Amino acid sequence: MANCGEEPNIELPLGALQGSILDVQCVYPRVNDCEWSWNAEVGTLGVCLPNVKTARLFEIRK
């Protein structure tokens, strides 16, 4: 789980990729100001965003 304290800001369910080893990279913006982690066991991507009302674009590769 991404480290934002106790819980990530958001958990993105990616059930079709559950159990897969993935390479996840934040591709936009290039400034790396957020944390994320892939939980293959349950198929979720935990993301910690630096501010409310912000977004990131991730590239996910198997």
Image: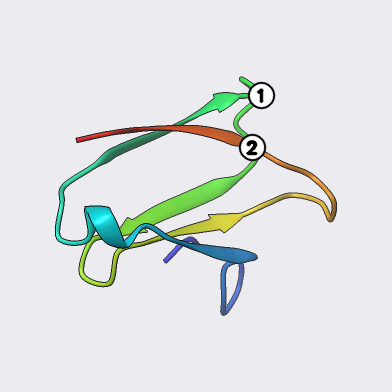
The image shows residue 33 at horizontal and vertical percentages of: 65, 38
The residues bearing labels 1 and 2 have C-alpha atoms spaced at a distance of: 7 Å
The part of the image, by quadrant, that contains residue 34 is: top right
Task: Report the residue at 79% width, 44% height from top.
Answer: 54
The part of the image, by quadrant, that contains residue 30 is: top right
Residue of label 2: 56
Q: Is disc 1 in contact with disc 2, using a CB cutoff of under 8 Å?
A: yes
Q: What is the three-letter code of the residue carrying label 1? A: Pro
The image shows residue 6 at horizontal and vertical percentages of: 57, 79
Q: Earlier in the sequence, mark 1 or mark 2?
A: 1
- In the rendered image, the residue lying farthest to the bottom is 6
Above or below for 5 versus 49 = below
The image shows residue 15 at horizontal and vertical percentages of: 30, 62
- Disc 1 on helix, strand or loop? loop
Q: What is the three-letter code of the residue carrying label 2? A: Arg
Residue of label 1: 29
Above or below for 17 versus 28 = below
Above or below for 23 versus 2 = above
Task: Report the residue at 57% width, 76% height from top.
Answer: 7
Q: Quadrant of the C terminus?
A: top left
Left or right placement of residue 54 versus residue 11 in this view: right
- In the rendered image, the residue lying farthest to the front is 16
